[in-house]
Image (cartoon, helix red, strand yellow):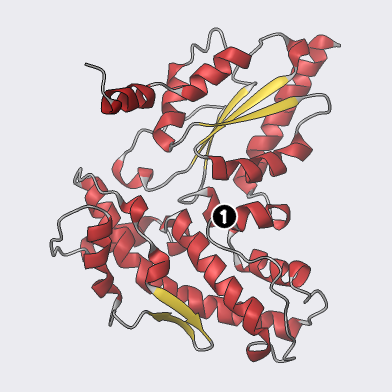
Amino acid sequence: MITKESLQAAKASVNEAVLKIKQSYSNSPSARKIFFVVEGKDDIPYYATKAESYIPDGWKLSIIPASNRNKVVEAYRSLDWTSFSKKLILFFIDRDLSDYYGEDTPSDSNIYVTTKYAIENELCTVDTFIRALKFYCDLVDIDETDEAAISSFYDSCWQQFVEISEPIMSQILYWKMNGIDAKYANYKIQQTFDITKSGLRLKSQYKTALDILPDFFQQSKVPYAIIDIKPYSDILNSKHTPDEYIRGKYILTFFSKAFTFVARNSSCILPSQRSAKDTLSLGYENVVIKLCGIMKVPKSLHIFFAHMRENLILVNSLVS
């Protein structure tokens, strides 16, 4: 019997990224088509924008969102590389916490794996924060004293955000290392804190960061259980710094809330008492879309793109 659930399961079992590649791929050098397979639609603006200057003239770029990390890996493993060129099909994968518990992460010349949890971790920096305020919020001519004040406020808020995030990320690592299926992507970390003139503050219903965990369990669809997560915090910090292991989506939330506060209250933070204009209306879902133009290319991605360009130039030479 065909049911709605069986149809949804059948659809989920199909790797649409593979289908789209097979429909559009051509191994003829004269076709000049290159494919990027990314995890989600929100990855498209950044990778498309930053790849542009590396792709030779005359080439057409198609970016295919696979829907999640596993689907990207599956797409790579599903293609017959005797029939497809690794110069023309590239894969972009977030590291997540894979190096802590051995999740399947293939390594190949056409695979880019972020050096931090996700690409967002590379982009949401204090440098991007200040550049966005200057270029988009009418603060382009602020001096070094004002910039230092912004940096100090951002860093103070960040340290407080780390205190909130560490127990959450430790709990995620516990779940992953113990094979517990948790829907932690459901969690709305923006509900836990506010940005004020004094810095980042927990919402009034929480006394400490650990008090967040019952709500975190509930939203992650896991029965609440008190466990000692300190060993998992130690494991996290033994391999990476917080900016490297905190989920990219959480960092986007922190960045957007901090930015909105500063853009609307700059006169309270800047020694010059300059008033910014909040022209961006950032939310965690649109930070990369709105700011990808001023976000820098991480060194690891620059190297990957430079290698891609060399390969495409080589393909061009076969046509000439």
Q: Nearer the viewer, residue 278 or 112?
A: 278
Does 121 sit left or right of 168 as displayed? right
> Picture coordinates of residue 209 (x, y %)?
30, 74
* Along the viewing direction, whichever of 92 and 309 lies nearer the viewer: 92
Residue 102 vertical placement versus 214 (above, below):
above
Q: Which of the 4 quarters of the picture holds residue 288? A: bottom right
Most extreme residue toward the right is: 320
Tag count in the figure? 1
Residue 108 horizontal/vertical position (percent):
51, 27
Disc 1 element: helix
Residue at left offset 31%, top offset 26%: 9
Q: Nearer the viewer, residue 279 or 273?
A: 279
Given the image, on which type of amino acid does mark 1 rest? Answer: Glu
Q: Would you place residue 94 above or below residue 167 in this image?
A: above
Residue at 78 percent across and 11 percent down: it is 30
How far across and down, in percent of the image, does residue 268 sit? 63, 90
> Residue at the location (59% across, 28% down)?
90
Q: Residues within 10 Å of mark 1 (few under 14, many from 20)?
A: some
Classify residue 140 as left or right of residue 253.
right
- Please tell me in which quadrant of the rendered image residue 125 appears: bottom right
Name the spot of residue 58 as percent of width and height, x first: 82, 24
Q: The N terminus lies in which quarter of the figure? A: top left
Can residue 287 be seen here? yes
Which residue is drawn at the image coordinates 41% and 56% (left, top)?
245
Q: Is residue 106 visible?
A: no
Q: Which residue is mark 1?
A: 122
| Drawn side of residue 42 relative to residue 233, left or right | right
- The C terminus sits in image quarter: top right
Above or below — where is 241 with respect to 205?
above
